[in-house]
Amino acid sequence: MTTPTAGSPAPLVPPDERYPLGRWTVPDAAPETRRQLIAQIAAAPAALRAAVAGLDDGQLDTPYRDGGWTVRQVAHHVADSHMNAYVRFKKALTEDAPPITAYDEARWAELPDARLPVAPSLALLEALHVRWVEVLRALTPEALETRGYRHPEMGFVPLRTALGIYAWHGRHHVAHVTGLRARRGW
């Protein structure tokens, strides 16, 4: 192994196929950050639709990485996850720190509806995000900090944290699909 010298290219580091965007981090409380996160959530349905556009059944049934979900499962998972997120936000806005239940994402990805065509989940995601983004845009900075839910593994999750999680989540899974497409030349 040689050490790169000045002016030589840095060695290539293979991308982390599990976390193509890196791991999620807690967002700051700046108003511009909030606007960006909401915009990312608003853009997620179109980004996922574009990521899976034109893929045939064989491609949709290809895991995005060794040991990972198929593209089809990823598309259905995003809809499942964001449905749960929407309900969590609504509960947090109408109840005082409500306890929420976690769900076994891996087992949900094995249920029969995870083998359907992706179109129903893409349509569901688009409709869901219209309503969710409306709620998000109405949030005050105070609500983002003081309203939240109690997650059985994470404890109290303020809505600002949840906003960051789900903005990252949509982009994260789109990157799984687009990364696979790039690696396979699709």
Image: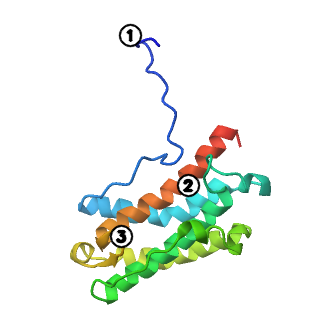
Which label lies toward us, 2 or 1? Answer: 1
Tell me whether circle 3 and circle 2 mark residues in contact (CB < 8 Å).
no
* Earlier sequence position, callout 2 versus callout 1: 1
Q: Residue placed at 68% from the left, 61% from the top?
A: 72
* Earlier sequence position, callout 3 versus callout 2: 3
Q: Which mark is residue 116?
A: none
Q: Is residue 184 left or right of residue 98?
A: right
**Secondary-structure class at tag 2:** helix
Q: Position of residue 184 (x, y in %)?
A: 69, 40
**Secondary-structure class at tag 1:** loop
Q: Nearer the viewer, residue 118 or 42?
A: 118
Q: Which mark is residue 174?
A: 2
Quarter occupied by residue 40: bottom left
Q: Which mark is residue 5?
A: 1
- Indicate the amino acid at tag 2: Val
* Earlier sequence position, callout 3 versus callout 1: 1
Q: Nearer the viewer, residue 65 or 152?
A: 152
Q: Residue placed at 73% from the left, 56% from the top?
A: 61
- Indicate the amino acid at tag 3: Glu
Tell me whether circle 3 and circle 1 mark residues in contact (CB < 8 Å).
no
Q: Residues within 10 Å of mark 2 (few under 14, many from 20)?
A: many
Q: Is residue 39 visible?
A: no
Q: Is residue 170 above or below residue 184?
A: below
- The single residue placed furthest to the bottom in the displayed view is 95
Q: Residue placed at 22% from the left, 77% from the top?
A: 146
Alpha carbon separation for disc pair 3 and 1: 47 Å
- Indicate the amino acid at tag 1: Thr
Q: Residues within 10 Å of mark 1 (few under 14, many from 20)?
A: few
Q: Which mark is residue 153?
A: 3
